[in-house]
Amino acid sequence: MYDPRSMKAEEFICHEEIEETLRFADAHKHDREMIEQILEKAAAYKGLTHREASVLLACEEEDLNERVCQLAEQIKLDFYGNRIVMFAPLYLSNYCVNGCVYCPYHAKNKHIPRKKLTQDEVRAEVIALQDMGHKRLAIEAGEDPVNNPIEYILECIKTIYSIHHKNGDIRRVNVNIAATTVENYRKLKEAGIGTYILFQETYHKESYEQLHPTGPKHNYAYHTEAMDRAMEGGIDDVGLGVLFGLEMYRYEFAGLLMHAEHLEAVQGVGPHTISVPRIKHADDIDPTAFDNSISDEIFAKIIACIRVAVPYTGMIISTRESESVRAMALRLGISQISGGSRTSVGGYAEEERPHDTEQFDVSDQRTLDEVVRWLMKDDFIPSFCTACYRAGRTGDRFMQLCKSRQILNCCHPNALMTLQEYLEDYASPETKAIGEKLIERELSNIPNEKVRAKCVEHLAAIRNNEGRDFRF
């Protein structure tokens, strides 16, 4: 029986409820009166239930679909402005004991080189990332209790935070590792992580068990209930996601929103982020072997519907997607993207991009500087800000700030100041020239006059090399 307040995976992600939701959506996909009412609710920034959002996703009325996209763009601007948070993944180890059939790190893949970074190699990777200009990382590792125990992850986090190279610092480490215990989540919290990210891959239990035939990840309930354990362990911010293409996208969409509803109901705060990866080619993985792939058009609609359904959450798109797809996604609700990413273990310290240990093919292979310049030419502000984590604006405190749409007075100036740091320390001359004009133009969008004046003061200090890491 469906119960969003239940702590059991099969009750807060209820198969029968999803099936009924899909039938309801099919029955009302041409119901203009109902869809108008749903859009009216979404336009009031109250969010949508999984069932309401599923009706929008199923809608086949072209003019109403266009309104969904327009509303998604407006919600993104009203909640997050034109800021786009920048990050990079850092792969620590590809040792893995699981048998996931869509991932080249699966235990049966005997020809992929297995590699685990030493602390000296972690240091080299971090320095390379700092020299690019990154301030925020998402660390990744396969599940292997022998090669990648929690103690190794914690040691890597400590190493990352310890490295101060020139003007470079990694100010926040987000963590994407396998489902673990409350005790281990508590250790990650104490290590100073930002967001704990774990993709469900698929919410369809039968498909999940077939796609994860061996290894600890086979346990659907343990994996699905991980976010509750993470929050019990003190982690304020968690990130959800599914791997679109493994199962029918409308099923996944409903399950994803049900998970968000569950966290809101039980923990008092929904997901900090939602990611929307699609299955891509990798070492011994052929995405065409999965018969649920989705077109760019449907992908765009999914992003727009998530944005109107969960207006407060950050949305992430990775370099799995091409430049053109990412450009489309930015308009529809994405608020975080990776730049200059390498998905191999030890990839950043190498001059040439290595491919032998990549988790997936990178479609957008531009440098961070090229991505930053591209964003600014489209009037987005690339933000390297990590202030909320360090100011304690996490969990319900961040959500309160976001839901009241008061983040312009902190996030906007913080974005401009961290962009100024990037321009001074890492940018090419062309990127710097574009950025200076953008910053000057965007200062007027800071509502509070005192905040604006202080921001101008800090920007001057950064330009004169009189300080870094100013924040509101």
Image: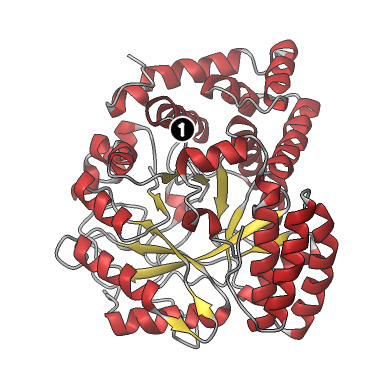
Q: In which quarter of the image is the C terminus?
A: bottom right
Q: Quadrant of the N terminus?
A: top left
Q: With 274 as the anchor, is 80 left or right in this view?
A: right
Q: Name the residue under label 1.
A: 260
Rendered residue at 27%/65% (across/down): 153
Residue 345 seen in the figure? no
Across and down, in percent, residue 190 comes to 29, 57
- Way the structure is coloured: secondary structure
381 to 210, vertically: above or below: below
Which residue is situated farthest in the left direction here?
A: 146
453 to 353, vertically: above or below: above
SS at badge 1: helix
| Residue type, numbered disc 1 | Ala
64 to 23, vertically: above or below: below
How many marks are shown on the rendered structure?
A: 1
Q: Quadrant of residue 427?
A: bottom right
Across and down, in percent, residue 344 comes to 40, 73
Count residues near mark 1 (Cα–Cα under 10 Å), then give few for <14, some for 14-19, many for 20+: many
| Of the pair 94 and 262, the residue shown nearer to us | 262
Q: In which quarter of the image is residue 149?
A: bottom left
Q: With 245 as the anchor, is 79 left or right in this view?
A: right
| Of the pair 361 and 85, the residue shown nearer to us | 85
Across and down, in percent, residue 398 comes to 53, 43
Rendered residue at 26%/74% (across/down): 114
Residue 250 seen in the figure? yes
13 to 227, vertically: above or below: above
Across and down, in percent, residue 183 comes to 20, 48
| Of the pair 279 and 309, the residue shown nearer to us | 309
